[in-house]
Image: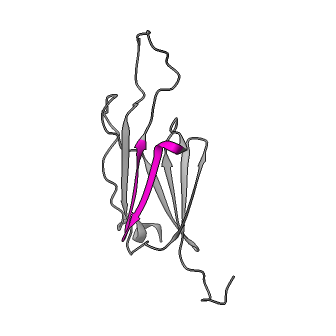
């Protein structure tokens, strides 16, 4: 199942060789579940209020920014490897995901998005 599902997903961008201040593309995992889909996006250090999620047709778009909130003004850096700037992730699904029930939560540096499709069993199922 995983092999046949994976061919539909197009992951845009790569986080390799990114310098601070440039757009970066976080890593993501996509799972097909009995209820719909689950997406995990690696966003360590990103605050929930700095994330925007949008669904259009068969595309899930995630964008935002990671800010350096721990460094005070007046100092200089010795080494800087963490990217503090805007990010985006675009995931294309094999079919439309418009109208899904979208829920998200941050858990240990991961943004976990659940996309629930219509309930099984029709209108009578609750």
Q: Nearer the viewer, residue 78 or 29?
A: 78
- In the displayed structure image, the side of residue 90 where residue 33 appears, left or right: right
Q: Residue at x 42, y 44 (%)?
A: 64
Residue at image coords 52%, 35%: 45
Q: Quadrant of residue 57?
A: bottom left
The part of the chain drawn in magenta is 49-64
Question: Quick one: which residue is furthest to the right in this view?
Answer: 126
Magenta segment's dominant SS is: strand
Residue at image position (66%, 90%) is 124
Above or below, 1 against 28 in this view is below
Is residue 63 part of the magenta span, yes or no? yes
Q: Is residue 63 left or right of residue 100?
A: left
Q: Position of residue 25 (x, y in %)?
A: 36, 44
The quadrant in which residue 78 appears is: top left
Q: Is residue 123 left or right of residue 9?
A: right
Locate the C terminus by quadrant. bottom right
Query: Going by the image, does 18 lie left or right of 51?
Result: left
Relative vertical location of residue 92 with respect to residue 64 in this rendering, above or below: below
């Amino acid at each position: 199942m995983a092999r046949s599902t994976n061919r539909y997903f197009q992951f845009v961008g790569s986080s390799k060789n990114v310098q601070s201040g440039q757009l970066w593309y976080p890593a993501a995992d996509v799972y097909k579940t009995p209820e719909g889909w689950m997406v995990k996006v690696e966003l360590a250090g990103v605050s929930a209020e700095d994330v925007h999620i949008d669904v259009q047709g068969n595309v899930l778009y995630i964008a935002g920014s990671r800010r350096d909130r721990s460094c005070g003004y007046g100092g200089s850096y010795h080494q800087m490897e963490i990217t503090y700037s805007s990010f985006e992730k675009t995931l294309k699904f094999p079919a439309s995901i418009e109208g899904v029930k979208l829920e998200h939560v941050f858990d240990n540096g991961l943004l976990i998005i659940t996309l629930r499709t219509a309930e099984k069993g029709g209108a009578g199922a609750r």
